[in-house]
Amino acid sequence: MSMRFAERFTGKVALLTGSAAAEKGELMGFGGATVWRFLEEGGRGVVITDVQDETGERSAQQLREAGHDALYMHLDVTEEQDWSRVVDATVGHFGRLDILVNIAGILDPKSLLDIEPEIWKKTMEISSVGIFFGTRAVARPMEQSGGGAIINLASMAAKQGSGAYGTAYSFSRGGMLNFTQSSALQLGSMGIRVNTIMPGWVHTPFTDYLYTDPVQNQYRTDRVPLGRWGEPEDIAGLVSYLASEDASWVTGVSFPVEGGKIVGG
């Protein structure tokens, strides 16, 4: 790693949602890969949040044993009081907040004719209400820290209709692209940049049930021009760029990271 990269997050503090799976030696999610990269590139500390408390606590403990300042906190992103508690605790512990990475999400497993309304609502709320509450909660603390970066993790499904399932997921993730543009416009004067990443098929705990199914795996691999599934590190690299000063003039943009799937059809 170059010295420039090793120091580019010096003094910075990051908060990530949906990021419990951050243990090295285990299958990590986007948040896990991002957390380790952020800290190895000089980050001062991280707060990983999720509703999977046991996994999150193990991850935070491993990070601390590696010499990093890391906290795990329970966060239901659809609850505004949870956001207030977590952001207050973050600022109380570190004295600042510079980066928010919105990752939390769930997938609806049925067609729009079969899905239960409760699952539809929950899927929509985690994507839409979750990033609304989160963005609003961190804006003032980020401004007080001199500005910051918000990175929303949507999906390549945001650009495509769904087939047999995932209607609520693709609908809600599409809305994240518009929210990113609006919040970028409204928060720019506070020194806050907002961007979105649209991952394709990446092997994480979220998609492991597809990855480990030979038929489902091959079906997806065959549709990716680069001929492979993504790894969490493929996403973490772009998260790190967008969170850093290297992207200081980048805001309101949505980036596909999917091996060429969208252009390939």
Image: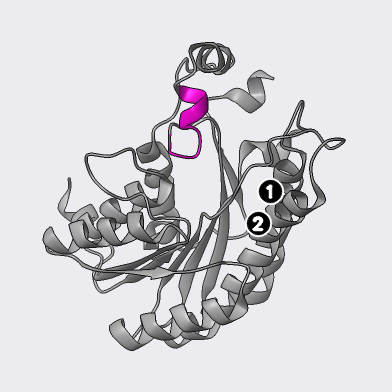
The x, y position of residue 212, in whole percent, is 44, 21
Q: Residues within 10 Å of mark 1 (few under 14, many from 20)?
A: many
Residue 206 inside the magenta-drawn segment: yes
Q: Is residue 118 visible?
A: yes
Give the residue number, with chain letter if any, for mark 1: 173
Residue 35 inside the magenta-drawn segment: no
| Circle 1/circle 2 CB separation < 8 Å | yes
Magenta-tinted stretch: 204-211
Give the residue number, with chain letter if any, for mark 2: 127
Q: Residues within 10 Å of mark 2 (few under 14, many from 20)?
A: many
For the point 69% across and 41% down, which residue is it? 108
13 relative to 68 in the view: left or right: right
> Which label number is shown at residue 30?
none
Above or below, 245 against 211 in this view is below
Q: Nearer the viewer, residue 232 or 2?
A: 232
Circle 1: residue type: Arg
The x, y position of residue 231, in whole percent, is 39, 33
The x, y position of residue 63, in whole percent, is 20, 59
193 relative to 70 in the view: left or right: right
* Image quadrant where residue 243 sits: bottom left
Above or below, 222 against 243 in this view is above
Viewport quadrant of the N terminus: top left
Q: Nearer the viewer, residue 98 or 105?
A: 105
For the point 45% across and 88% down, which residue is it? 144
For the point 44% across and 69% down, which residue is it? 74
Q: Is residue 190 visible?
A: no
Q: Nearer the viewer, residue 74 or 147?
A: 74
Say which label, 1 or 2, has the lower sequence index. 2
Element assignment for label 2: helix
